[in-house]
Image: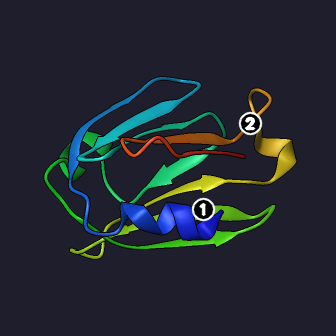
């Protein structure tokens, strides 16, 4: 799974939206939706234009998307934090999907 998520590296964030239950991030080659608790180092919309530097995934703990400026967006993968049946979904332009 983390190999596929690594394809986020180098992608720029084009759009970001959030509500009380989810967050949606649109990258140059991936649509990413978070349905679990998430944290952003600053307001999501202010991350638009930044490029992904790294992605870290720790099963049943968290997924973190780190940007080139040091900013970070992370999603809790702890089952107690799920709002629905999954924590996130990443749909890549290549056709690959990652759901956890």
Answer yes or no: is residue 1 visible: yes
- Extreme residue in the left direction: 49
Look at the numbered disc 2 and give the secondary structure of its residue.
loop
* Residues packed near mark 1 inside 10 Å, few (<14), some (14 to 19) or many (20 plus): many
Q: Is residue 96 left or right of residue 7?
A: right
Answer yes or no: is residue 64 visible: no
Total numbered labels: 2
- Extreme residue in the front direction: 94
Quarter-wise, where is residue 63 in the image? bottom right
- Extreme residue in the right direction: 80
Residue 60, x across and y down, in percent:
81, 61
- The residue that disc 1 covers is 63
Instruction: Determine whether 20 is above or below 33 in the image.
Output: above
Look at the numbered disc 1 and give the secondary structure of its residue.
strand
- The residue that disc 2 covers is 86
- Residue at figure coordinates x 13%, y 52% from the top left: 49
Q: Is residue 97 left or right of residue 93?
A: right
Quarter-wise, where is residue 56 in the image? bottom right
Residue 37, x across and y down, in percent:
64, 43
87 or 6, which lies in front?
A: 6
Circles 2 and 1, Cβ within 8 Å, touching? The answer is no
Residue 21, x across and y down, in percent:
59, 25
Instruction: Determine whether 82 is above or below 10 in the image.
Output: above
Lower sequence index among marks 2 and 1: 1
Q: Is residue 26 left or right of residue 49?
A: right
Residue 9, x across and y down, in percent:
34, 69
- Residue at figure coordinates x 26%, y 59% from the top left: 11
Which disc, if any, is residue 79?
A: none
Q: CA distance from mark 2 to mark 1?
A: 13 Å
Q: Which quarter of the rendered picture does the N terminus lie within? A: bottom right
* Residues packed near mark 2 inside 10 Å, few (<14), some (14 to 19) or many (20 plus): some
């Amino acid at each position: 799974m983390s190999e596929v998520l690594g394809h986020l590296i180098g992608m720029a964030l084009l759009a970001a939206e959030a509500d009380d239950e989810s967050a949606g991030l649109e990258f140059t080659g991936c649509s990413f939706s978070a349905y679990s608790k998430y944290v952003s180092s600053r307001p999501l919309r202010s991350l638009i234009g930044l490029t992904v530097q790294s992605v870290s995934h720790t099963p049943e703990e968290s997924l973190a998307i780190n940007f080139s400026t040091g900013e970070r967006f992370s999603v809790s993968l702890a089952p107690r934090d799920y709002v629905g049946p999954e924590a996130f979904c990443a749909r890549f332009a290549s056709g690959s999907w990652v759901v956890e």
